[in-house]
Amino acid sequence: MTYDVDYLVNEDQEVMIIDPFTGRTMEGRRYSDGLHQAIEAKEGVPVQNESKTSASITYQNLFRMYKKLAGMTGTGKTEEEEFREVYNIRVVPIPTNRPIARVDHEDLLYPSLEYKFNAVIADVKRRYEKGQPVLVGTVAVETSDLISQKLVAAGVPHEVLNAKNHYREAQIIMNAGQRGAVTIATNMAGRGTDIKLGPGVRELGGLCVIGTERHESRRIDNQLRGRSGRQGDPGESQFYLSLEDDLMKRFGSERIKVFMERMNLSEEESVIKSKMLTRQVESAQKRVEGNNYDSRKQVLQYDDVMREQREIIYKQRQDVITADRDLAPEIKAMMKRTIERQVEGHFLGSKDEAIDGIIKFAHTTLVEDGTLHAESFKPMNKKEIIDELYELALRVYDSQVKKLRDEDRIREFQKVLILRVVDNKWTDHIDAMDQLRNAVSLRGYAQNNPIVEYQSESFNMFNDMIGAIEFEVTRLMMKAQIHDNIERERSVQESRTTAVKNIMPNQPVQTKDAVSFEGVDRNDPCPCQSGKKFKNCHGRK
């Protein structure tokens, strides 16, 4: 991870991830598996706790939750098949307001990256000296920095739109159409806006868009081209390619490179400009787009499994939240099913071992230790044991409920209990499903369909989660230490930033009684009873 390339630290002491394709900072996004914490420690900023996924959904399923979808875009034609298959949306092309006057030149192919970038710099310098504004579009932030360094060496003044000054994006784009303006940005710059041409720019040919590389998606290239020639304005577009580009490497650039080497061509002679080349590149892009669509489709198939489970959990959760009734029947049903599962599971072995296991389960989950004995259960069959344990559980439940005294408190306690368990188990289930998805792809080597395997495994995992929820609700209901002051736990919204100004308000609130901090060592527990060390609480400097 490189500073100012992969991430940066803003003025609020936050480590912000930089999108490598747009050059913009991604608000609220954090690296997982402790990587973000490691970067925070490296940069000497406050380290935030590891984040945990509490909900996940693909963009496709998010949009499919709406009954009606519609929209406008300038590049939807290239994704027509995906719109139709995923969203059942037709793509209807609408002619432009005014005829397009932009001149789209044929692609230029160079033998190496060095040759290509030198040609780009020479073209930009020539147009700058003429006064024609230029917008240089790159695929990645690293390329933007490289072009900027070369333009500085060539003595061409320019603006660079990246993560460090993205807050100036509107101003930079506004000035990009002025006479002699040179702007470097990723191919996402200025989307949704019209770059206005300054005085005298029309006569010079309008805004020239230079692409330093073909993107694997035609849609992105069309978006970059579309920065020029808006509303009937004149303009130009030119893409520069090399045999060392990622897209060219995928589709047989080695043969062309060998041919050029055999011909022993000079730098000027080795440039290829042909309509056939442009068509070949677009054909390669179509194949890559097809592969990417297949990948997205596969992601959607995986998420469809999660979607079904998500709908079940959220529906039941919403029913609990909005319930204006006693939830005792639901809790008692959970208790009954938990007891049945445990007894059935223990009876898979010998009866003596089963009874010992059942008594252990009952002592840890249902009743006080030492209240049950094996001798009383040995004459009973499986059904009688289940009925006996259920009767005991009902008595314990009634005694627990009596401690709450008030009907409203009982309902409040029931809701808090169920929601807390469901939320904890569901977030754990999401993590487990992510791990399963990463592992299940390997089963393709055994000639098994990973999707089918994922569906089968996830079904079993979901049933296990439901069993775990019912077990935990039963255990907490039976074993909870209930007091008179029970009320719904207020979930504190955790700060999603490491900024000190946002962390400080979340420090424990000092009690009314004044607390003295004199003589407290940095590593001693804080006197405010927060459970933290003094240096991490009120001793923070």
Image: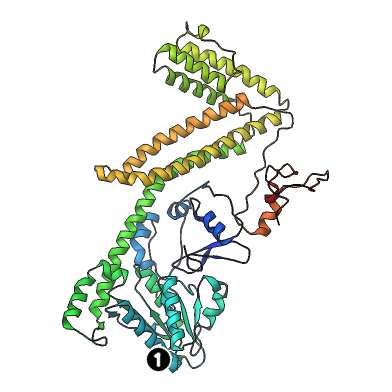
| Residue 67 makes an appearance in the image | no
**Residue 187 % position (x, y):** 43, 73
Q: In this view, does 342 lie above or below 263?
A: above
Q: In which quarter of the image is residue 335?
A: top right
Q: Residue at x 70, y 22 (%)?
A: 402
Q: Is residue 64 left or right of residue 267?
A: right
Q: Residue furthest left?
A: 262
Q: Which residue is drawn at 29% across and 73% down?
A: 244
**Residue 34 % position (x, y):** 50, 51
Q: Is residue 463 above or below residue 441?
A: above
Q: In this view, does 453 lie to the left or right of 180?
A: left
Q: Depth check: 267 or 439 in front?
A: 267
SS at badge 1? helix
Q: Depth check: 214 or 296 in front?
A: 214
Q: Which amino acid does label 1 sit on?
A: Arg
Question: Within 10 Å of the Cα at label 1, are there few (<14), some (14-19), or many (20+) other Cα atoms?
Answer: few
**Residue 320 % position (x, y):** 59, 36
Q: Quadrant of residue 453?
A: top left
Q: Residue at x 61, y 18 (%)?
A: 368
Q: Is residue 411 above or below residue 232?
A: above
**Residue 132 % position (x, y):** 44, 90
Q: Is residue 257 left or right of residue 66?
A: left
Q: In this view, does 368 lie above or below 538?
A: above
The count of marks equals 1
Q: Mark 1 points at which residue?
A: 126
| Residue 144 makes an appearance in the image | yes
Q: Depth check: 501 or 191 in front?
A: 501
